[in-house]
Structures are given as structure tokens and as C-alpha cells.
Image (tube, rainbow, N blue to C red):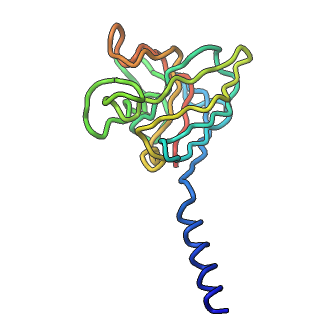
Amino acid sequence: MKRILMFMMAVLLVAGGARADEVVVTMHLVSPSGIGKEIGNITAKDTQYGTVFFPNLSELPPGLHGFHVHQNPDCGPGEVQGKMVAGLAAGGHYDPMDSGYHAGPYGDGHLGDLPALYVDAEGKSTHPLLAPRIKVGDLRNRSLMIHAGADNYADQPAKLGGGGARIACGVVK
């Protein structure tokens, strides 16, 4: 009986330790005047291949959008040259190795470079994304940002992939 109890405890410990890290991030529209309406959430889960992001979003413009981890856990606006800018309090792309450049989710640039987010014709995003270089632990106390335009994963011809304005954001706790 003692052996069976010890075996069951070992199985429970292994099962509990094998559970992947996971976080659910509530996403909001952002504008120069502040944080707006909730538009859904993104679940991030560690796997043996990297972190998989499971978006469940609505009310976004159709098409591909730049999607990144930003440095600060703040989605508020900020001021640049006297003009308020949406989501600026989130800071820049998460870049713990100080690479200083944008190279996409498979390159060796910013760690916060994630795969592009696809939004369907109805404004919904539900297609999972795999980011092989980042872990859920890296996301904590940062923010997830969705940009107005697509991302070419380069700094040319436009800086930071050309994604443009920040349109939705969520703080990762």
C-alpha cells in the first residue's frame, strides 16, 4: 500500500511539473485618447516548439497585422512632439539582448517580434501563431501589441516592419 501511495504521488508531481506555462491576455482597442473597448483575448501557451498564441479577437480591420511583445506593461497613450500617440506607454519591442533590429519571429533580432496576426473579413482573429524563440515567462510584465498594418520583419523600407499605428494592446500579468 505504501508503494502504491508513493507511486501515485510521484505521478502527480510529474504531471503537475509537466504542465505547460500559460497566460490569458485581455486585449483592448487603443487610441491617442487612451485604452478603449475590450475586443477579446489571446491565450499564450508554452510548447516544446515555442509559445503558441491563440487569439480570440473581434472588431479589428481585416488583413495581416504586425504583432509584437512590447517592453512595458502599460497600454496607455504617450506624447511625442506635443501629439498624443496610441499605446506609446508600452515602449518599444521587447529586446532583452539589445539586438537593436527587427528580424521577425525566426530571426535573431528583437525577441518580441511575433508572427503576423491574421484577421478575417468579419474582423475576427482566431488562427493560432507559433513564436519559437519566446516563452510565456518572457511575456510577463510586458504587453502584447497589434499594429494597423502588416509586418515585413525588416527595418527597410520602413522601420520596425512598417506595421504603423498601434491599434490594440493587452497587458500580460
Image location of residue 5, percent across then percent down: 64, 86
Farthest top residue in view: 157
Front position in the image: 35 or 59: 59
Position of 41 with respect to 157 (left or right) is right
Residue at x-position 58% and y-position 66%? 16
Circle count? 0
Residue at x-position 55% and y-position 29%? 34
Front position in the image: 125 or 16: 16
Q: Quadrant of the N terminus?
A: bottom right
Image location of residue 72, percent across then percent down: 41, 39
Determine the image quadrant of residue 101.
top left
Determine the image quadrant of residue 142.
top left
Farthest right residue in view: 122
Residue at x-position 42% and y-position 13%? 162
Image location of residue 4, percent across then percent down: 65, 85
Residue at x-position 56% and y-position 16%? 64
Determine the image quadrant of residue 169.
top right
Image location of residue 172, percent across then percent down: 52, 44
Front position in the image: 165 or 93: 93
Q: Is residue 134 above or below residue 59?
A: below
